[in-house]
Image: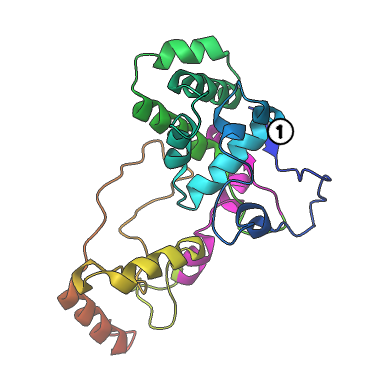
């Protein structure tokens, strides 16, 4: 799998230059595509040639990663707002995007998904892009697309936004903190927005990390995913009491 690296439209950025993602994806104050939706989802339109297919995939990946409703933009592309664009045109465009991502042929992708509904095809696109999309934890490295199965351990560690939480949690036997929010900084704003209007029993508790987990996912041959753990007030109080006891006694 070749690696697609982010480039500005005007000039190629040096690896140590600051990349202002907000300027690109929040040009008008709100998250959105840098170009009109036909640039991304109508392969027949003139706008489709405004940027490369790799660039389209990177833009889609960034917006999906940050919770933007890309599906609404896709559906709007073949809505009454664009009478010259058919749903089939958009389907063909999605085949082109997937073929580029997988380095395959468009007709083969079409054979795979031609019997799927439009919503199911969009789901396939989102799943594929999010698997390949990587956003570095700092603004001095470009985002890129690469199959995680082809990534080195260092690349996997470098693109993991939960590294900072792991550092805070290491040497914390209780996995409970009175000083830190044990949550990925990329997710913090979204979670705090949810907590602001959620019922007390539904709020996320940011002083405990995502848990339980066991073992090293980088070396595991099988990874089992389960439901999110619940929060128990009684257990939390017991843990707080244990923290006050002498370490030897604990």
Position of residue 80 relative to residue 231, above or below, is: above
In depth, the one of 112 and 162 nearer the eye is 112
Where in the figure is residue 168, as x and y percent of width and height?
48, 71
Against 217, is 16 above or below? below
Q: Please, is residue 9 above or below residue 45 in the view?
A: below
Q: What residue is pinned by disc 1?
A: 50
User: What residue lies at 47% left-to-right and 50% top-to-bottom?
Assistant: 68
Classify the position of the N terminus by image quarter.
top right
- Say whether residue 23 is magenta: no
**Residue at (46% x, 29% y) in the render:** 78
Q: Residues within 10 Å of mark 1 (few under 14, many from 20)?
A: some
- Is residue 51 in view from this perspective? no
Q: Residue at x 20, y 80 (%)?
A: 238
Q: Quadrant of residue 36?
A: top right
Residue 137, quarter of picture? bottom right
State the image quarter where residue 233 is shown.
Answer: bottom left
x, y (%) of residue 213?
Answer: 34, 55
Q: Secondary structure at mark 1?
A: helix
- Name the residue located 21 percent from the left edge and 71 percent from the top edge: 199
Q: Which residues are magenta?
A: 141-168
- Looking at the picture, how far across and down is residue 111, in whole percent? 44, 10
Q: Is residue 158 magenta?
A: yes
Whether residue 203 can be seen here: yes
Q: Quarter of the image containing the C terminus? A: bottom left
């Amino acid at each position: 799998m070749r690696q697609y690296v982010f480039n500005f439209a005007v000039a190629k950025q040096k690896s140590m230059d600051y990349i202002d993602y907000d300027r690109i994806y929040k040009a008008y104050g709100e998250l959105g595509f840098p170009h009109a939706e036909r640039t991304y989802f109508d392969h027949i339109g003139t706008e489709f040639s405004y940027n490369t297919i790799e660039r389209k995939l990177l833009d889609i990946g960034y917006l999906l990663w940050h919770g933007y409703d890309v599906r609404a933009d896709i559906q709007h592309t073949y809505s009454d707002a664009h009478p010259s664009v058919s749903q089939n045109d958009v389907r063909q465009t999605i085949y082109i995007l997937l073929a580029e991502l997988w380095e395959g042929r468009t007709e083969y992708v079409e054979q795979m998904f031609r019997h799927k509904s439009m919503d199911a095809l969009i789901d396939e696109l989102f799943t594929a892009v999010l698997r390949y999309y990587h956003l570095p934890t700092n603004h001095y490295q470009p985002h890129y697309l690469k199959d995680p199965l082809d990534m080195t351990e260092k690349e996997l560690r470098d693109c993991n936004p939960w590294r900072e939480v792991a550092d805070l949690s290491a040497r914390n036997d209780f996995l409970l903190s009175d000083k830190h929010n044990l949550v990925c900084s990329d997710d913090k704003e979204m979670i705090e927005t949810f907590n602001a209007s959620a019922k007390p029993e539904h709020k996320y508790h940011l002083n405990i990390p995502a848990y339980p987990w066991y073992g090293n996912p980088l070396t595991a041959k099988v990874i089992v995913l389960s439901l999110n753990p619940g929060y128990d007030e009684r257990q939390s109080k017991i843990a707080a009491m244990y923290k006050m006891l002498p370490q030897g006694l604990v």
